[in-house]
Image (cartoon, grey):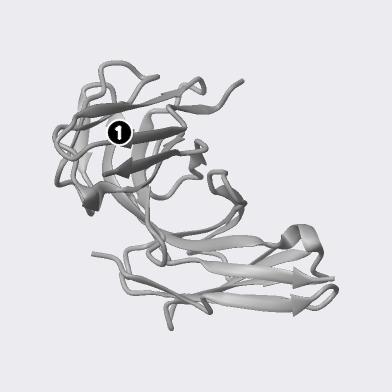
Amino acid sequence: GENVEQHPSTLSVQEGDSAVIKCTYSDSASNYFPWYKQELGKGPQLIIDIRSNVGEKKDQRIAVTLNKTAKHFSLHITETQPEDSAVYFCAAGSARQLTFGSGTQLTVLP
Amino acid sequence: NAGVTQTPKFQVLKTGQSMTLQCAQDMNHEYMSWYRQDPGMGLRLIHYSVGAGITDQGEVPNGYNVSRSTTEDFPLRLLSAAPSQTSVYFCASSFGGGGNQPQHFGDGTRLSIL
């Protein structure tokens, strides 16, 4: 089955700096790569996703890049704000199921 | 719209007890799934359903049963609870597809097995 590795497990940045979270996947059949943000006591919420026919996607301060050859994808958050503090999950999906990484606790320091 | 609603929010059980975690969605989504979330392990798929009357196993199905009699509801049953099933459980739904569509998650059920 699919295996998704996510790094780092914790990340602290100063407010206004950029944050980068990286994931690798193993199954070449995966064609959908979403990122979820989870705040304390809540369920994960989709923040951005990318499909395998696209190399990069941007939505305001958030961007995701995908390298299909190397089987890795990354989340980039620019101009971080305290409200960006949360746990972020990457995932790799195919027709059958979605497999999640182990999560990154992002802390934005004021 | 309420989205995905999970009940109860918290539950404490004794080893060997049974219970049902409820999940309902009002978005007419065909695909529904259950995940468990444990520290440092992300979310792991327990069972999923591609439509009423159709269910299948995910990565960690042992100890759990599901059924899907309607589009809206997808309950998860623990037949004989074990301490290893202490976790946070999330239900999700999506329009069509399976793992390649945006998932809408409920806010979870926090379950402790003593």
Relative to the observer, which residue lies in front, B7 or A104?
B7
Picture quarter with the C terminus of chain A: bottom right
Residue at 18% across, 40% down? B15
Quadrant hosting residue A102: bottom left
Relative to the observer, which residue lies in front, B97 or A17?
A17
Position of A36 with respect to B113 (left or right) is: right
Pinpoint residue B87: horizontal percent, then vertical percent.
Answer: 35, 49
For residue A92, above or below residue B96: below
Relative to the observer, which residue lies in front, A30 or B45?
B45
Q: Is residue A31 visible?
A: no
Residue at 58% across, 22% down? B2
- Badge 1 amino acid: Val
Residue at 30% across, 33% down? B50
Pinpoint residue A6: horizontal percent, then vertical percent.
Answer: 46, 74
Tag 1 residue: B50
Pinpoint residue B6: horizontal percent, then vertical percent.
Answer: 45, 29
Pinpoint residue B97: horizontal percent, then vertical percent.
Answer: 38, 41
Picture quarter with the N terminus of chain A: bottom left
Query: Mark 1, residues whose alpha carbon is within 10 Å: few (<14), some, or many (≥20)?
Result: many
Q: Residue furthest bottom?
A: A70
Position of B88 with respect to A51 (left or right) is: left
Quadrant hosting residue A41: top right
Position of A45 with respect to A24 (left or right) is: right
For residue A47, above or below residue A28: above
- Dot 1: element: strand
